[in-house]
Image (cartoon, rainbow, N blue to C red):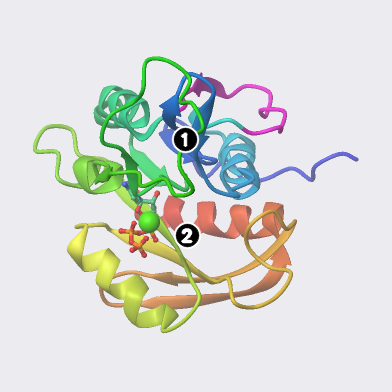
Amino acid sequence: CTQPEQPQLLTGKTITITAGPTREPLDPVRFISNHSSGKMGYALAQAALLLGAKVNLISGPVTLTPPTGANLIKIESAGQLLEQALILAPKSDAFIGCAAVADYRAAKVAEQKMKKQGDELTLTLVKNPDVIAAVANLTDGRPYTVGFAAETQDVASYAKGKLTNKNLDMICANDVSTSGLGFNSDHNALTLFWHNEQKELAIDTKSALALSVMSELAKRL
Ligand code: CTP
Ligand code: CA
């Protein structure tokens, strides 16, 4: 199907978007990850392109086809995501962290495939760097910084907490306790929070929501 013409609200702007899960290796054949499909991040990239932006899409492993015209940077771990984010963010007008970054990684990655041993296995995990907070706290070339928050309870208070604690400009929150929405779905509902304002975006396709998020962003760049 053909996309309707969109007003070129983002002409001359560069938007960097992170999408999908990260994979944190345990050994050469195993990793820790999550169910993020990357659909929302890829929809945001598509929407930004439709509005005339130049788009960098830093993506974890997903099965989606990247939108035509996006500069795709493939990463696996949170460490690799941080490295690429810190290269691209200072060259961007806006940075949108839609990736589901694994909060922890293995303290030590085994060099050889781990062999099955006793009845229990204890893994020691260490906290990953917070990519979006690192971008939001850049002193040189800090872009307008937008986070995402998927919550199962107290959505508004957790989202607003993240907006403040991570020093973001905007956060898009979704309630993943609503069945059929969020992870892996083609639909979602979002509440957008700024420090002094909020806006509800009712249930819609991720493409339609992405266009709404991008036009709200465009007003603020
Ligand atoms: N995020 C990030 N780096 C991390 C963890 C999260 O950049 N190591 C970003 C996500 O991409 C998202 C935002 O932070 O834009 C919120 O992610 P979320 O997982 O909801 O927040 P956490 O701070 O990890 O809190 P928690 O998982 O405990 O709710
Ligand atoms: Ca997290």
Residue farthest left in this picture: 139
Q: Position of residue 153 (x, y in %)?
A: 46, 82
Residue picked out by circle 1: 117
* Distance of label 1 from label 2 (alpha carbons): 54 Å
> Quarter of the image containing the N terminus?
top right
Q: For the residue marked with disc 1, what is the amino acid? A: Gln
In the foreground, 158 or 28? 28
Q: Which region of the structure is painted magenta?
A: 62-76
**Considering the numbered disc 2 on the image, is that residue within a helix, a strand or a loop?**
helix
Main SS of residues in magenta: loop
Residue 75 among magenta residues: yes
Residue at image location 27% in from the left, 77% down from the top = 196
Q: Is residue 54 visible?
A: no
Quadrant assignment for ligand 1: bottom left
Position above or below: 98 against 213: above
Residue 69, image quadrant: top right
Q: Which mark is residue 216?
A: 2
Q: Position of residue 81 (x, y in %)?
A: 37, 30
